[in-house]
Image: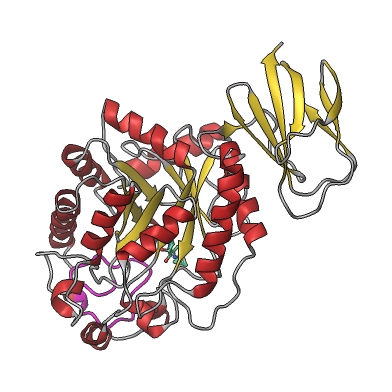
Amino acid sequence: MKRITTLLAALCCLGGLSAQTGYRPAPENLAARQQFADGRFGIFLHWGLYAMLGQGEWHMTNANLHYREYEKLAAGFYPARFDAREWVTAFREAGARYICFTTRHHEGFSMFRTAQSPYNIVEATPFARDVVKELADECHRQGIRLHFYYSLIDWWREDAPRGRTGLGTGRPAEKEDADAYFDFMKAQLTELLTQYGEVGAIWFDGVWDQDRNPSFDWRLGELYALIHKLQPACLVINNHHLAPFEGEDAQAFERDLPGENTAGLSGQEISRLPLETCETMNGMWGYRIADQNYKSTERLVRYLVGAAGRGANLLLNIGPQPDGALPAAALERLAAVGEWLRANGETVYGTEAGPVEPRPWGVTTRRSDRVWVHIFNCPDKELFLPLEGLRVKQAVRFADRSKVSFAQDDAGVLLRLGEVPAGADTIVELTVAER
Ligand code: H79
């Protein structure tokens, strides 16, 4: 099976998904990968003109809005409450170690100062401020890394290659010009990597738009080589829902933990690169006025810890409002997750997946001789952990360091826990030694 998937991946590359050939990551890139993986928690931001419509970031194509009408939103975009310092402070206090911001989503509007198109926040809106610059300066001040989401697909540009989406936005077919579009993207990526200081990652999305056109070439090799030339430490991440291509520095998953596939976007094999999965706080990426279906703090913590227990980061999304403020429900959850991480972050940051595979009851994380057993749902008053090759020297509840009694043999350890509350993360810390 694995061989078939590898073969398929190779065929995909031949069929146009060419990646950076002969890529040897620079030492500073390898260091950045480690720092990225150690961070475990990032905040994803989907913000663009679509916020004004309050229907999520796909409304332009879902409602087949004409591009000449849609672009008029720009003249009314004035997010008076936008304050980069407030945003970044809230993310840092939530315990996030990085932010990924949509510099340009599928709607095609650039949220940064660009000379490549007048359709950008500085030139086309009365706000006339480069929010990416303000965020970058603030991130650098507060020691948070900044990643740039960059869409490969564009529903507004006339030259953008047509895939399976954005077909009803009224653009004349004869204006399609892939060469011009790739020049545009390369010039914008150059701006993003030279105007804003250190960039933690470029996060691509949209490869799947051409999945019915296997001969289409996204020229990813050229894009990746450009990024690594301008900033060797900058990670290339591409949310294409496939096994990684050469030239990528971390692997993305969407709306599922690695190894799970409830949303149907994450059937790809899990690579040895740093892993990251993204998920929404409510049900949408971009601001959706009718969606107050926010996940509880407990659930968000379980998801973050569930990711860590699979050796992955969580990139947790927020859709800022059209006025530039973050939704109150999101701010509440950020504060609560931050409080949890201040108490328990030691068991998440800088860890790797623990020795016990994820189970229905929870996950394990590990750093050197410490293993943290995160119990979300204990079926019993006792919990057996298969720990072949490891000897447990001590077991304590992480919260109060109280001893947990246990028995062990060659197969593993039986923890005598007593009652464990359902839903929350009860953490038992094991001190282990190799057998
Ligand atoms: O930016 C956010 C979304 O706007 C974007 N990625 C996240 C991070 C995204 N939108 N949809 N998807 C991801 C899921 C893609 C679903 C697909 Fe399909 C199923 C792609 C191909 C098959 C549905 C049908 C969408 C396009 C065709």
The residue that appears at 60% across and 37% down in the rendered structure is 347
The residue that appears at 45% across and 37% down in the rendered structure is 37
- Residue span colored magenta: 155-173
Q: Nearer the viewer, residue 370 or 190?
A: 370
Question: Residue 375: which quarter of the image?
Answer: top right
- Colour convention of the picture: secondary structure
Q: Is residue 312 above or below residue 285?
A: above
* Rendered location of residue 294, percent (x, y): 59, 70
Task: Name, please, the residue furthest toward the left.
Answer: 115
Answer yes or no: is residue 388 visible. no
Q: Is residue 296 above or below residue 420?
A: below
Magenta span includes 293 = no
Magenta span includes 160 = yes
Q: Nearer the viewer, residue 90 or 219?
A: 90
* Rendered location of residue 107, percent (x, y): 30, 73
Q: Nearer the viewer, residue 218 or 87?
A: 87
- Quadrant where the N terminus sits is top right
Number of residue marks: 0
Answer yes or no: is residue 294 visible. yes
Give the dominant element type of the magenta stretch: helix, strand or loop. loop
Q: Is residue 3 left or right of residue 64?
A: right
Q: Is residue 420 left or right of residue 350?
A: right
The residue that appears at 39% across and 49% down in the rendered structure is 98
Q: Is residue 265 above or below residue 163?
A: above
Q: Is residue 186 left or right of residue 69?
A: left
The residue that appears at 31% across and 77% down in the rendered structure is 49
- Quadrant where the C terminus sits is top right
| Ligand 1's quadrant | bottom left
* Rendered location of residue 35, percent (x, y): 40, 35
* Rendered location of residue 356, percent (x, y): 70, 31
